[in-house]
Image: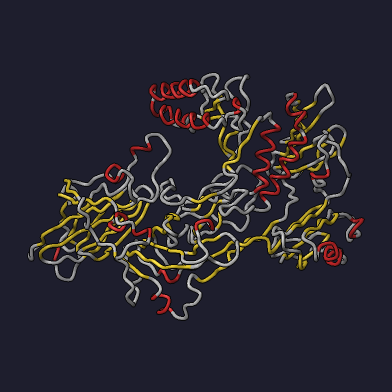
Amino acid sequence: MQRFTAKIVDLMKQERLYASQGGPIILSQVENEYGNVDSSYGAAGKIYMKWSASMALSLDTGVPWNMCQQGDAPDPIINTCNGFYCDQFTPNSNNKPKMWTENWSGWFLGFGDPTPYRPVEDLAFAVAIFYQRSGTFQNYYMYHGGTNFERTSGGPLISTSYDYDAPIDEYGLVREPKWGHLRDLHKAIKLCEDALLATDPTVTSLGSNLVASEYKTSSGSCAAFLANIGTESDATVTFNGNSYHLPAWSISILPDSKNVAFNTAKINAATESTTFARQALKPNADSSEELGSQWSYIKEPIGISKADAFVKPGLLEQINTTADESDYLWYSLRMDIKGDETFLDEGSKAVLHVQSIGQVVYAFINGKLAGSGNGKQKISLDIPINLVTGKNTIDLLSVTVGLANYGAFFDLIGAGITGPVTLKSAKSGSSIDLSSQQWTYQVGLKGEDTDLGSGDSSEWVSKSPLPTMQPLIWYKTTFDAPSGSDPVAIDFTGTGKGIAWVNGQSIGRYWPTSIARNDGCTDSCNYRGSYSANKCLKNCGKPSQTLYHVPRSWIKPSGNTLVLLEEMGGDPTKISFATKQTGSSLCLTVSQSHPAPVDSWASDSKILNRTSPVLSLKCPVSTHVITSINFASFGTPTGTCGSFSHGRCNSPRSLSIVRKACVGSRSCKVEVSTRVFGDPCRSLAKSLAVEASCS
């Protein structure tokens, strides 16, 4: 621990990157959420924590150190908060700032799980109430989603995609309206900077679940946060003699303690559509036979095939056996079955029982796949098998899909086939325990040792027909880069499970046959109320991940090599490219009660132009313009993007006004007011909803 930490610090010092050297690093962290687990280690946990703090301080970086989720971090280490909300957090000393080191902008995806997402109204609420309650610093985890290339995904069973519903997605594209709403939030908070830095707030109750916090300095700087923490009802409150409307579970930010610059529940950023456009991997192939002929293959041997295999009595734990050099470990057993044994009863099969602690098991009997299963921490298989008189081979392939990486004693969780493994006669019920037999072990696959992922081997076979829907086959083909400059993914629909390489670079594990559970998803998610990882889910009953990111920088214009290790059985000719395209459709609803755009404020917290709310649209692609307005209604429109409809109240001039303002331009602004649209229903609050197309 000390060698590693000192090495990193030395690298930073050599490049003069610490703020104390004139560089950009203002804070360093030692350990990560150790306080959540240290009690499990008793006194030793506390000793280690204090040692880590002392060791870090001795490295003399000249900037503060923090420990997250460590309530008893010793001075001067700053204890900080991680979570969906940190407004209730208090540091363990009045001399330490209130810091939020991980604000979880979404949640990670697991194979076999639906896709989690976090509404931006709730995320903005969490940030605003943190600063309302004297927060000093907050940091998003994640702000930019990513990809778990190679075998880097944690877990177990964390997907290759680590998109996290982040404001910037896995492919480097902004996710709207999340990105834009957070941009406006931070502009509003920045307008309050002088007051926030100068003083603590005065907190006033405005009613049940209604709170005002005002930062006011002797020099006249002021800012206020008005919060409706209730989850059910909107409210109208009076503050400093003025009336304010607060939607449920929302906060209004008033940089001058009078005028609202931002409300967390009222979004001024347009929703931008994103689509994946499919392109054939082999666009010139006219038939399935021709497609197959453009692939070559190598069959991975079933069972033991390497010279470094070894024999041990009993069943070995996988991680300690492989030292995490490979996802794969073969457990192989040879048996002699006499002709009079009950396992050969005519008309019935023997049953092979296998227990594993994760995460995937394939059972082969005499070279043929007999069954398989998967699970996070426990797999229990009962597989009917056919044995023959004489020699029989049981080959069990255990596969890890990411290793446990957090929690007390996570290093002891283990993986692999830990037993029991038994063989039972289906007819007589008699059984034998195979667990303590002499098993032969092989770490990894032969194709891994010979670096088939690089595509350079001379062993590739190009005979027709291409073998498909069979386990443990390596496939190779060549391809040209998809046209255009949009981010690239490969759609692995049609394959089973495995690992893929592009030009020798592993793009990670693929598993399009891992299906999310059917329950827990909703058409829409109510942002009001506390968020949790299972609150907002989508894609139930569908593959957890079919699209796998391939960075454009890894792809040449032509002559690229794609290699698959298909472990489960699939058809590689079914896969295709998908390029991620954004911004062909823009949607936004702005009400008369929305704040004016935050950009209408000057940096000194004075309103430049006292405007009405404004609906703003901008095509995200610089060469695109708004070509059509598909829907526009000022009144009481209903629905969401793609399903807007007119309400009982609608200005008949809506469509023509928005078309005139927007069509032919990359961006446009339309004032949301009766001055522009007239008043189709004087007694009702009105909104402007617009759906536009860009090209």
From the viewer's perspective, tell me whether residue 165 is left or right of residue 301: right
Indicate whether 349 appears above or below 59: below
Q: Residue at coordinates 87% horizontally, 42% vertically from top-left?
A: 608
Q: Position of residue 125 (x, y in %)?
A: 68, 41
How are the residues colored?
A: secondary structure
Indicate whether 663 appears above or below 156: below
Q: Position of residue 261 (x, y in %)?
A: 80, 41
Front one among 334 and 258 = 334
Front one among 183 and 588 = 183
Q: Residue at coordinates 83% horizontally, 41% vertically from top-left?
A: 601
Residue 574, quarter of picture: bottom left
Front one among 394 and 179 = 179
Let me know if residue 7 appears in the view.
Answer: yes
Q: Quadrant of the C terminus?
A: bottom right
Indicate whether 268 appears above or below 659: above
Q: Quadrant of the N terminus?
A: top left
Let me know if residue 33 appears in the view.
Answer: no
From the viewer's perspective, tell me whether residue 392 is left or right of residue 462: left
Q: Position of residue 388 (x, y in %)?
A: 14, 67
- Counting every numbered tag in the picture gives 0
